[in-house]
Amino acid sequence: MSIDLSQFIPSFLEESFEGLELMESSLLSLEQGDTETINSIFRAAHSIKGGAGTFGFDAVTEFTHLVETLLDEMRDGRRDIAQGDIEILLDSVDCMRLLVMSIKEDTTCEDEKIIEVTAQLEATLKGSDISSIAETSNIQVNNETASDQTTWLIEFIPEHHLVKTGNDPQFLFNALADLGEVSIEANSSELPALNDMDPEELYLSWSITLVADIDIEEIKEVFEWVEDECQLTITKKQIPSSQDNNNTPQVKTDNPLLINEPSTAESTNNKQNNVQADESAPPIAKTTEPELKVKPAAATVKTTKPKADVGSIRVGVDKVDSLINLMGELVITQSMLSELGNDFDLSKVERLNRGLEQLLQNTKELQESVMRIRMLPISFAFNRFPRLIHDLSKKTGKQIELILKGEQTELDKTVMEQIGDPLVHLVRNAVDHGIESTDVRLANGKPEQGTIILNAYHQGGSIVIEISDDGGGINREAVFNKAIEKGIVDGNTSLTDSQVFDLILEPGFSTAKELSDISGRGVGMDVVKKNIQSLGGRIQIESTEGKGSTFKVHLPLTLAILDGQLVRVGSEIYIIPLITIVESLQAQSELINRVSGDMVVYRLREDNVPVLPIYQLFNLEAETKEVEGSLLVVVEAEDQKIGLMVDDLLAQQQVVIKSLNENYQQVEGISGATILGDGSVAMILDIPGIIQMAQNNALKSFNHKTDKLTYSEEVTH
Amino acid sequence: MTKILVVDDSNSIRDMVCFTLKSAGYDTVEANDGQQGLNKAKMGSFDLVISDVNMPNMDGITLCSELRKLPSFKFTPILMLTTESSGDMKQRGKAAGATGWLVKPFNPEKLIATIKRVV
Amino acid sequence: MDIQSLVDEIPVEGEYSLEGIDFISSGEQYLTFQLGSEQYAVNILSVEEIRSWETPTIIPNSPIDVKGVINMRGIIVPIVDLRIKFSIGEVNYLETTVVVVLKVELEDSTRTIGFVVDAVSDVLNTEDDEIKKSPAFGGSVPHYYIDGLVNVGDNVVTLLNVQALQSIKPHE
């Protein structure tokens, strides 16, 4: 029988990655004498090794074996938990991850780091005494080699307590019978008198003749589990097999009654009935199948490549249960509606409406439940940071404490996967540019140890992730001057603090005096911003010089669905995310003002909200071109309100977000597209993006004017 | 039908062992650590127990000695599934009443062949 | 012209079913179409679908040759007017105006884009040695879009490079 286990490879891989993460986080929190933690690390390594061995992933098995040996010594107390060892183990986790990853991607892993760490592990292990305990065996081997149809004589004298370990001679004999032809003779001379007999003890011994073309090792293997509890003598007999066949297989029992029913006292288990000598022997003798050999099949497990990774999510049973409940309700509603449809008349309209209402409710709840399946706690993204801080701290010589908050805040899996790298970059940035070196901190009267806080919480329909440090903060002047120098801004522009800080996120900006391998080469922060924007999120910087900085990343909870307000501009329909809308109103002329040239602002209570006609921004034909009396949708993003001028307000509905990037590209002011009920495509407005666009346009036209001014001056001279 | 209790904290190993056993016509019950294994053992009777050694909450060795205290498991074969083939681990298993051990890497054919020695 | 019947005639990969034409497997098959009075062709293996013209949803501030996006079975597909892109012929949308949807395999993804053309004409079989180099001067179609020229009777068909076609100008 061949059993293909390759279908279990993906779950092995997933489990391995989880195990590695556990190892890593446990190693970082490991303290001397913490046996429970070291045990759990050991178990994780052990499982990975076991699984890898099964599938024949030898590189993983071999490497993990070294790791496991080291951990075993720590676990047994043979080795103290030294910081150096933890470093090696952390490196080993990295290597194991590389190796497991290479299996997943079906590549060969030839990273030098693995060779290096292997050498380190070996050196560390050599330093300690790892003499393996010699295996004890009381098997007497008289003849080593086997030839055709050898006859083996096996003397098997079990100790009396053999059956108490669950072993049963009959099954051993069955296994021997699988190897070749057997004849068994029981010896009951040891049997005590009935009164002296313990029904749970075994008093018999056996002489077995086995005719088979096998190696002595194969016989020994059958008795592997009982070798410590018996006297076993295996002798090779030189009698030709033909003669041996004449021996009628039989069992002589001198006193079968005496060993009858040792299990009567144990009526719950009838296994040891088999020790009955009078019944057990004949079936054994009959089962002679010399062709069936038990051979350790070494490499039969195929390591076929796992199928294309479609990804998987582990979902709590409660979430699935709630889905099933909702499905049930949906089915009830459906049957109610279809019954109603069987003979419908107007008197049933009320019931139909109720039914449709219920259907709406069911669908909504079902949708929420389905979305919840994709939600995972942010700890999945946070858990890599302790290690990162540990490594960075070592590399920079800065002492840093990392505090994680709100780890249970849930986030869509897709968002989680894509936010990992930007977060790493922001944390690296905080270590590199935020936290000052120890002497600077001490000179400024700060504690030697810097603190970085990662915090996550829900705010409305989005999640906010904060990366705060208690470092030097951002030097406004330095940033501004640098930006001018790099040609990112005009020196005459007056900017608010937060606008200045945002310059850090512009392409081509880097304030680090020297390039470091931690925060990359100044190419990072603009990419961070871009990645966050492509997720429909935004980033906000707060900083106080001398006190530290906070980077706030706002992200949508999910990328899949959005509550939207449909609006019309000319012949086009756009969707404004409901969450950004402050209110919609008809512009009253007395509240409209024109300021600083031609900018239109609308007085909304205390605020002056700039008015932005969408048709202008997107170069469209529109019905409404005058602000007076027009429809304004006031939206807010990044603490900035803006009034979007539209032709008409249509329905509010949930829309499924489709990416424009897939077949096209990122479009400024547009976060994606969706398909409406009639099958047409509608664009979803990216409110922060639109505000940014409007600001850029204003800046551009301002610069344009100043350019013109300079030009005309030149002309006049 | 021969009923086997499989105790392992690794999902993939447990799945594979059960898959293999089921393919060979055995009935299996799964438990993901020693404690759960013991609870399940108390609730039913089994013809064989296959258990990992290293597990959280209750390890395989403890499970084994706990099972041996139960009247219905006094003679039930208990096999330890382990990567540790050292004599030390075998001795500890034996002392706890284990019937035998299956050395990982786990090989389906060998698993089927070897458990025939006890059931 | 009945577009659908033409679509049905397009053989799938490995299926040589058009009658009256000798297929020799070393050559490639191309779908030819008209832009103005000129004949162009793309490798037939990259043709996903031929659709009739429908007004797409405008992409704000897109380059003028990008007409917008349409919904093709739940996928958002951008529509590029090749006549505008290459400045050939008159840009009008008639009943015969069709959209050739091409699916292009890129290094790590695939891209599906629809191209507006005046009409789809035929399936062309060529041997590699029949493909001639395009002269590197003149014309409104930049040379990097052109894989070569093929003579068909008295006409010349320009073979377009599908990979080059899928690259879209970034927005201003």
Image: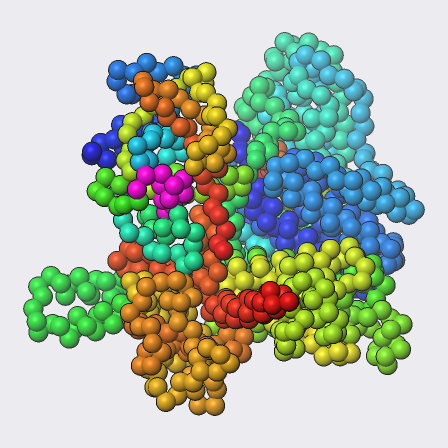
In the foreground, A112 or B51 = A112
Q: Is residue A110 left or right of residue B18?
A: right
Q: Is residue C22 above or below residue C118?
A: above
**Highlighted range, magenta:** C78-90
Q: Is residue A505 left or right of residue A697?
A: right
The image quadrant of residue A298 is top right
Q: Is residue A292 above or below residue A277?
A: above
Q: Is residue C82 magenta?
A: yes
Residue at 73% from the left image edge and 59% from the top image edge:
A519
Residue at 39% from the left image edge and 31% from the top image edge:
C42
Any part of residue A60 in sight: yes
Q: Is residue A628 above or below residue A481?
A: below
Quarter of the image that includes the C terminus of chain A: bottom right
In the foreground, C70 or A368 = C70
Any part of residue B1 in sight: no
The image quadrant of residue A509 is bottom right
Residue B14 in the image, given as x and y percentages of width and height:
58, 47
Q: Is residue C112 left or right of residue A310?
A: left
Q: Is residue A544 above or below residue C9?
A: below
Residue at 72% from the left image edge and 64% from the top image edge:
A485
Residue at 59% from the left image edge and 49% from the top image edge:
A14
Q: Is residue B111 magenta?
A: no
Residue A300 in the image, given as x and y percentages of width and height:
60, 29
